[in-house]
Image (cartoon, rainbow, N blue to C red):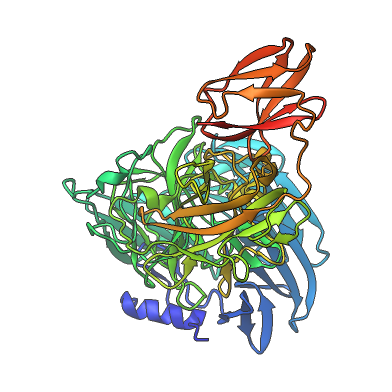
Amino acid sequence: MYRLTKSIILYLGIFLFGINTLNAQSLSPAGHIIIPDRNNLDYDVVLQNAKTQINFQQKKFNGNTLHQTADGFLSIDANYENAPATIYFYSVAGTLISTKTFPQCINLQLSEHKNFIAFYSAGFIHSINLKTFDEQKIIGSTLFAINNQGELSHINTNRTVIYVDDKNIQAPSPIIQLINNNNTWYYICKNGIYKYADATLSNVYTPKKGIIFDAEIYNNNWYISTRTKSNTQYQYYLNKLSNFTADTFIETKTYARVFAKVDAPENIDPKFNNRTNETFKNPMDYFSTSSYQAIGNSYNEIQEYSPGSTYLHPGVDLFGDHLENVHSVKSGYVKAVLTTSGDYHWRVAIANNNSSTDSSQGYLYAHLDEQLIPVIVGDTVAEGEVIGQLVDFPVTGFVHCHFARIVDKGVTWSGSWWTFDDPLYYMSNFKDTTAPVFEEAVAGQKFAFRDAIGDYLSSENVYGEVDIISNVHDLINTFWKVDVHRIGFKVNPINVPTLIITDDYSFDFNMFNDTYFNGPYVQDIINTMYSRDATCFSTGNYNERAFYHILTNSNGNDTITAFDSDLIFNSATLPNGEYALTVWAMDAAGNTTVDSMRFTINNFVGINVDKENLFSVFPNPTNGMLTIQMRENKTSALKVVDMFGRVVGEFKIDTVNHSIDVSNLPNGLYLLMFEEGSSVKFLKN
């Protein structure tokens, strides 16, 4: 498999963007400081058995990002949009010494002597001693640094407070970066650099123009990138500082800002006028009125890139080309610029509103090239403005922007946001003409019937309580299989096609998703929507994709709860005979496929259906009132149960003739169950 090495990518970028020297510090086109020989680990990342592997100097490492430490190497395997992340620790010879797994691994940093690391994970900053592998953690944010003694300093980004040496110090302005050099703390604010010494914070540098955008230390010299901003461009300036006294100008770069046309039409298909949230254009193909965007993964699709580690994909993967522009779909405020692993996982989060206390919806753009992100936290961006370019993702043919609608709150966002809404459903210029495809769920059957103990039944002999399972996928302007947007089913007797016993909406892939902070809800959804047994095994990775939906695990609304996973299709509530099962699936563009099959209900040992004629019901069928005539005048509790085993009504019978109102029930077949065990069916039409 072909892969670019990190060094080739660097040289290619230098050639493309006119950086005229490889031996001097310089600016990327988006104002980031480039120090060519800062990291000499020219490694390859390849895909092996659906997992990424690093090849470096005849050694092999797990993961996708490699760092050299004081006594060896460490690699990070956080190649996907899920938690957890695994850190592998190796000797100089490449022997695996230790492994640690965390919910997240955001903004990993090494101490100056490379003997400690620190990173953010789910509300905590973790630090690890690379000699002893002892671990500590403190509550913190994604803005931190670690020194050679393993001591941390971090920022409360919501209150702009510095935590250092057990002290809380108010920062003079928003801090964008922390650096520890020679065990001295430096805080890079937009308006200057501040040094912490003798329990005092003092200013050591103020930019001559604009704000500080980036800072690096190399060979005891400081390199500072400052930025000015106009309505049409960013202007970046690189200066070299010696002891914060001599300020030597090196170069400047102009970054032209790209904006959307105010009168650009959204071209919304009328059939989607009932959307409940704001629409937007494709961030990868913003100026097109008809964007046939190729999709690599759909929203809330099951993912399993590490065996047994499943999650729901919290967004959509929009295929693109290396260095392709990514546009902000709405005007807003930059709340996060961070990485969940390394070079390939930089992302920008932009909120619609700039509230520090209330939640705001916003948008996430991931897998950007860090050196080509022109914005920092606190910036404002316009609708349609370019906010980055795609990184050369380490899986051949899978360069993409991971895009999601998110919600969070705070001055800055830490990466633990909720996602919600299928972005393709709200993407106004998105086009797709290919409908979903049903495949056989089991050999010889379009759909499968699984009983309560996990055995699969023949469609010619269905009995008792069963799950109904489908196998469906979609192809969205590419050959990669993805999941659908909505799915549902109905059942009717073969001899009475117009008699719809049930017509249920199973799943809508629009639900909230807490994958980004490894919440419990995502696993509940997986266990409810997807079959994962040996016969109908749902999975999703680079080599294998199969989406087996348990259609009956739904109470008919678009909210999934733990209760849904207990629901079933109760064939015992129906008379024996032949029935038609019809299943429909729709993608986000509205393309719909309907497929069906016959099945036979044959309940050999049925329920006790009033064999002793203890009561009768009439009229049956009924469209409203149902009279129950008891043979004896006695009090009895009565339940009305639908064909999924759900109790939809409870009554107390205390007269010989008692009427109950069932007009509010959907049309279908129901079971009246008396507390002494007798039962009888009735039809609501």
Query: Relative to 267, is 276 above or below?
Result: above
| Residue 256: x %, y % from top left | 25, 59
Residue at point 74% right, 71% down? 89
Q: Nearer the viewer, residue 583 or 387?
A: 583
Which quadrant of the view contains residue 536? bottom right
Left or right of residue 215: residue 61: right
Residue at point 80% right, 12% down? 634
Query: Relative to 683, is 333 above or below?
Result: below
* Farthest left residue in view: 263
| Residue 301: x %, y % from top left | 54, 57
Which quadrant of the view contains residue 130? bottom right
| Residue 81: x %, y % from top left | 56, 59
Q: Nearer the viewer, residue 432 or 518?
A: 432
Query: Relative to 357, is 302 above or below?
Result: below
| Residue 124: x %, y % from top left | 68, 46
Residue 78 seen in render: no
